[in-house]
Amino acid sequence: MASFPADPALRATRAWPFEEAAKVADRASVAKKGGALFETGYGPSGLPHIGTFGEVARTTWVRRAFERMTGLPGRLIAFSDDMDALRKVPDNIPNAEVLRANIGKPVTRVPDPFGTHESFGAHNNARLRAFLDAFGFEYEFASSTDYYTSGRFDAALLRMLERHDAVRDVILPTLGPDRRATYSPFLPIHPKTGLVMQVPMEETRPADGTVVWRDPNTGERFETPVTGGHVKAQWKADWALRWYALGVDYEMSGKDLIDSVRLSGQICRVLGGEPPVGFTYELFLDEDGKKISKSAGNGMTIEEWLRYGPPESLSQFMFQQPGRAKRLYFDVIPRAADEYLANVEKFRASGDPANPAWHLHGGVLPNAAGSPITFTLLLNLAVAANAETPEMLWGYLRRHAPEATPEASPMLAQLVERASTYYREQVKPKKTFRPPTEAEREALLDLAARLRANQAAIEALPAAERPAAIQDLVYDAGRREPFLQPGKGPAKDGEARPGVSRAWFSAIYQVLLGQEEGPRFGGFVALYGIPETVALIESTLEKGAVAA
């Protein structure tokens, strides 16, 4: 049983996992069972990828929301369809000839080209489990091969045999004439070759629990039991079989599977079951807004994300608006990291269960969560200091933020390591500086003079007050044409001051740091140092170029 009491008030929480959890809680089967079964699926013909992480993480958040809302236990099954036939040789696999010689067999009957497991399916299943374990997911692993061969699906398979024609009636309207003539929900495993056979059934014999079919190459006729792992179900029928046999209450899927979900749901009802609650998530786009494709090579791997951002930043990215298409490329990592940090601070102050940090941490925020310095600020520090190693960044942090240590903030330690890598590999090769206009040059010189003149007074302030004091100087230096915005600035000494347009701050970042935007410049200067910032401004302007 769940280790916490039900909290029905969570139904009113405006967060999508609670909205999904409420749908699960309303199922009659959940009340009858006293709990709910959540499922995610995985095709083990390839290695786990960033989409696998997204689906398991999102389902986990719904499960947690369900448990806290209802006080009932939830189980998560990570189901591997490892009885599926190997259809092609994946890219970047060693000993490809081993796979090529076994195309058409269940992946658990294909030798492991890596030489580490009893089969290719077992190897990829092990990779999946290690992948999920590394992120601390709570799940039960399920193997399609095990479920078929152990008899766990036998009753459901016999039921599908009884309803064979009704199942076909669901699928046939979606097929072309040739495929319609041969379709059966059952795929016999050839008793001699071990191949998964996609052939018409000459007879179905529910009383005997068998199907009769013919080898199209030899003409030999076989009678095969549908039980004991001698057949597997076609894809949409297999999904429905699983829902029916296990009593799955919730499973989400991508937008590309909308039709499959609909058809599998119909088949589940034909068998006498109730399809699970479903959620359709949008697919990822690349930097140019194009659909990500493995063959096109325009995606990002989970290893690449974790090279540049902590795991929590990936979770934050997956949590936000799963029903909307999002661009998945390197530039989103810093933003996701800082959104996570901001949510941690908000959650620490309010404990709001609508906050993504509640879901990412299961409602209990670790003491070590959060960071006193944002990822974007660290990146800007790396740009200004040309800090290509964590040691260089720590040198600045120890000088200007001595309280920020790896021991006090493990998350900061992760951010420092990844920020230096991100700068070295993603920012530095793409940095594009532009010369200042004459007006920008004058404003930057004025900023340098103000910083130099006020250095002693600012350094006498408590550390927490310095960024705001420096930011005031940044605003004051920009209160000149062409950056003025009359009537938009805060009052000072009883007099209204004009505001400063975004163009002034864009100029600072484009001219000094070679990037389009960044965090509040006052915070950056407080961390980088006033003398260092003055030297950065003066050395940049001494290069002499002025934009027309």
Image (cartoon, grey):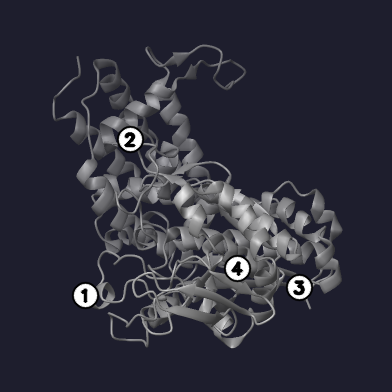
Tell me the residue that label 4 is attached to.
Answer: 367
User: On the picture, is 68 further left or further right than 212?
Assistant: right
Question: Tag 4: residue type?
Answer: Asn
Locate residue 436: give its quadrant.
Answer: top left
Pinpoint residue 538: horizontal percent, then vertical percent.
22, 33
First in sequence, mark 2 or 1: give its number: 1
Pinpoint residue 444: horizontal percent, then vertical percent.
30, 26
Q: CA gap, disc 1 to disc 4?
A: 51 Å
Question: Tag 3: residue type?
Answer: Pro
Tell me the residue that label 1 is attached to.
Answer: 97
Name the mark on residue 73. Answer: 3
At a point 43% along the width and 30% down the height, the residue shown is: 473
First in sequence, mark 1 or 3: give its number: 3
Question: Tag 2: residue type?
Answer: Arg
Pinpoint residue 72: horizontal percent, then vertical percent.
80, 70
At a point 46% along the width and 58% down the height, the residue shown is: 51
Which sits in the foreground, 214 or 262? 214
Q: CA gap, disc 2 to disc 1?
A: 69 Å
Question: Tag 1: residue type?
Answer: Glu
Q: Does any portion of residue 474 appear in the rendered image?
A: yes
Asked if 269 appears above or below 84 in the picture, the reply is above
Q: Residues within 10 Å of mark 3 (few under 14, many from 20)?
A: some
Do residues under tags 4 and 2 come within 8 Å of each other at their CB atoms? Answer: no
At a point 36% along the width and 79% down the height, the residue shown is: 120
Name the mark on residue 452. Answer: 2
Under tag 3, what secondary structure? loop
First in sequence, mark 3 or 2: give its number: 3
